[in-house]
Amino acid sequence: MDTRVERIRSEAKRLLESGEVDLVIGFRKGSIPMVSRPWFVRTVEDTELLHWDGFCSLNLCNYLTKRKEKVAVVAKGCDTRSLVGHIQENQIQREQVLVLGVPCEGMLDRRALQERAEGTEILEVVESDGRVEIRGRGLERSFPRQEVLQHCCRICRHRNPVLHDRLLSAEVEEHQVERYEDVEEIDSQSPEERWAYFQNMLSPCIRCYACRNVCPHCYCTECFVDCSRPQWVGKSLDLNDVFTFHLFRAFHMAGRCTDCGSCERACPVGIPLRVLTRKLEKVVSERWGFEAGTDLEQLPPLATYRPDDPQDFIK
Amino acid sequence: MSARRVGREALKGFITGLMEDGRTVWGPQEFQGSVRFRPLKKNGTPVLDVPNATLSPKEVVFPPSEWMFLFSTDPGREDAFVLKEVPQEGPEQVILGIRPCDARAFQILDRVFLEQGAHEDPYYRSKRDRTLLIGLGCNTPCSTCFCHWTGGGPFHTEGLDVLMTDLGDVYLLEPVTERGRALLDALQLDEAGADEVERGKHIAEEARASMGEAKDPRRIKEKDLMALFGSPFWERAHEACVKCGVCTYLCPTCSCFDIQDEVRGACGFRGRNWDTCMFALTTLHASGHNPRPTGKERFRQRFMHKLKYFQDDFGDVMCVGCGRCVQYCPANIDIREIIEALSA
Ligand code: SF4
Ligand code: SF4
Ligand code: SF4
Ligand code: SF4
Ligand code: SF4
């Protein structure tokens, strides 16, 4: 068994037995290949199902918002960054959460794997030694892990938990990868080309709001799209309203989004939403030198004011 | 019933034939990151060699967003704020390549929109009446497919006008309804050979046999409603669900919508958009009270509606086993497990 799985189970067991926490949130194996299920453990017995693999991509910080009990959470780099945001935004207290940090080798891209299966359904995925093997009826192919990582994981600079109480395996090497190649490519286009690009990108949207709802940072009591007095945005598939929704949502993520990729992964129609959030991430980083969720002590730019803030955008 | 045949290479010609008389032909097509039913262009081909589309062709008869009324907000006009119906006529249409589960889902939608007491839904009615379904049987059901649990199967014809079977080199076309037969007759297609009909039967049997044991959600009908409603089961079952709504937006049988008025300039529109019980807003009262205040109640509503209330009201579950909710749920909520738990 993966030693990380053993560590997760034994830590969870110890924490529950000693009463240090009331609840451990981690993952168990999913009922189908390529998705692991968030698992809420309150008894020692249930720790036996805790699991870890390349499909534990859902951001578990989703389940921490406004929790009252003492909780341990199994967290990879991006989950801990979202947790930092949550603590800064008072959605949970640091003392309430015990972070079981798992240095992350990057999560696997389900869509990319499925594409490589050439029309055959993937029934099993086996991960070993930096390789990933897919199996199905008459299908057996393997790839270097690096090739089938989610895009957000390929360009991740914080695979190691930024905050942890226990570290469940050795830290992994971090890479200062280039994060904005696609964003810069879009930036370099003319306004007309960009308009066409975004129209095309957003035209399949069905306004299901899954992108919003799976985001740990979207926890407002009333989302602006749901507000009816005043009504900020129309609700049909009129492209103007679809744009408004997406641009507002992205702006609400400025300096908060940790690029965990949840939105893009959840979008049933495959819209590459992260180009919007990463554009804002880039601006925030260039102007304020701020990287969301990496430092508990550093106040988020949207929550601070400094007389020397660059203000050249005010025309 | 006389079966017909269309060679794989002659599919384009067959579709062109369908388009004659101004018919719109909807078929599964790549639409950026997904496969959706879209009107085929002249000489366009549908993608038929993939498993079921991301969204069911429900959107053909019940679009994610549609206008029902128009009105003027100009107080100077005599008809200010008078609602006028948006004309509902449209071309005859064919949905080509709809899977048997999704065709059965149309029958479930029929019950909701057309067979509930005195009121019919005119928007659904108009589109439904001019739509013919040419279904494609499923040679290789996915592991997430469970149509056979819900009374269907990979080659079930319920709801279809024509059943199409992929024989490899040839598509076999078997009429199911009179309308389907008339359509095939008008197209003057070649008769299929008896051996081809046999091959089709064999493929259908193999497909069905590959699907494993079926559990029967109909047992849930026998259960006491209040006992299921009040069961402690929901406390934990909903925990992993992030209430993203994907399951219901992709479901071919979900039929909830939200009515909205919108105004641009002096022109007003009243339309409806898909909605879901997974959202708190759906049941939020103007007073601020919400009868489904937490995720638990919303999650329970989805499954109770599908598996219990609908069964009690209409005799069938409101699920055709297409498996989309299982495939696309980011938290791996698997309705098959819920069915087993509720029928236990
Ligand atoms: S998840 Fe995708 S389809 Fe749904 S609202 Fe977001 S972008 Fe649109
Ligand atoms: S898709 Fe899954 S997580 Fe999303 S609302 Fe449905 S059951 Fe919940
Ligand atoms: S509930 Fe799930 S499996 Fe059943 S019809 Fe809807 S999407 Fe398909
Ligand atoms: S399950 Fe929910 S969204 Fe679907 S039809 Fe029922 S109430 Fe509506
Ligand atoms: S659920 Fe049945 S009918 Fe639907 S795609 Fe799968 S095998 Fe075909």
Image (tube, coloured by chain):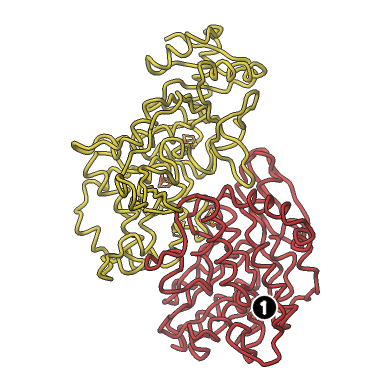
Residue A184: percent from left, percent from top: 78, 63
Residue A315: percent from left, percent from top: 68, 76
Give me the chain that's red. A
Q: Residue at x 47, y 25 (%)?
A: B93
Q: Nearer the viewer, residue B120 or A148?
A: B120
Q: Is residue B336 visible?
A: no
Q: Residue at x 26, y 43 (%)?
A: B311
**Callout 1 amino acid:** Ile
Q: Quadrant of residue A257?
A: bottom right
- Left of B27 or right of it: where is B317? left
Look at the picture and state if B247 lies above or below A294.
above
Give the quarter the ligand 2 occupies: bottom left
Q: Residue at x 71, y 60 (%)?
A: A149
**Residue behind mark 1:** A314
Look at the picture and state if A117 lies above or below A261.
above
The tint chain B carries is: yellow
Image quarter (top left, top right, bottom left or bottom right) of the N terminus of chain B: top left
Residue A70: percent from left, percent from top: 45, 85
